[in-house]
Amino acid sequence: GAVVSQHPSWVICKSGTSVKIECRSLDFQATTMFWYRQFPKQSLMLMATSNEGSKATYEQGVEKDKFLINHASLTLSTLTVTSAHPEDSSFYICSAYSGNRGIQYFGAGTRLSVL
Amino acid sequence: GENVEQHPSTLSVQEGDSAVIKCTYSDSASNYFPWYKQELGKRPQLIIDIRSNVGEKKDQRIAVTLNKTAKHFSLHITETQPEDSAVYFCAASSGTSYGKLTFGQGTILTVHP
């Protein structure tokens, strides 16, 4: 299957700092990528849909000024958690949509711990 | 919007038995139904999917059935093995051009040796 790379896999930061997470589709072009948040023992909660060359579409209740999404190319989307606080600690997962195959491929996830 | 309900939340079986997980969805326009397996701390892995123009799809020990009239679909795992233990998620997509998925709540499957 297709490969989606997500970095970093684990990050610890101090409260008030910003953290950037990268999501790359390595062997296909993804006009659309998705960002999810997953709490322990819970399902994937869609945060936003990232479209190349346009503004992201955020789900209800997700603060767009706190979770900045940039989809600058057909293979890269980034999520920046700004002014992180302990309650932002979570597992963040990206996915890239292959229009040719009609399938979403997931990154390995980033575990964010805010101290 | 779409709402996907998944049952059971936990499922415990003996090795060799079959396991069945069921999902219902609300949006009649949904036409793509994937199943993902997620091991602890890992990425969700697509294990099988079905589109609304078919009623059943099988891949070795895994099968998925779809009933569009009743708006439900199920995952069937036969001859379960301990390595099948994981969290399984169903999802539904309305089939828009960008493939947005709505996930079920997940089922923790434990296969006892």
Image (tube, grey):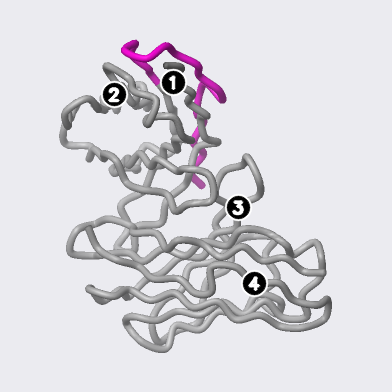
Callout 2 secondary element:
strand
Camera-nearest label, 2 or 1: 1
Q: Residue at x 51, y 62 (%)?
A: A109
Task: Give how far apart the Cα atoms at labels 2 and 3 are.
Answer: 29 Å
- Disc 3 on helix, strand or loop? strand
Q: Amino acid at mark 4?
A: Val
- Please tell me whether residue B59 belongs to the stretch shown in magenta: no
Q: Position of residue B52 (x, y in %)?
A: 23, 37
Locate residue A104, reporting x and y percent.
33, 57
Q: Against A31, is B96 above or below?
A: above
Q: Label 1 belongs to which residue?
A: B111
On the rendered structure, is B84 left or right of A99? right
| Foreground label between 4 and 3 | 4
Mark 3 residue type: Gln
**Chain to which the residue tagged by mark 4 belongs:** A
- Determine which of the numbered discs, if any, sits on residue B14 in the image: none
- Which amino acid is tagged 1? Val
Q: Provide the residue designation for mark 4.
A: A11
What residue sits right under mark 3 in the picture? A38
Q: Is residue B38 above or below residue A4?
A: above
* Both labels 2 and 1 in a single chain: yes
Does the magenta segment cover residue B9? yes
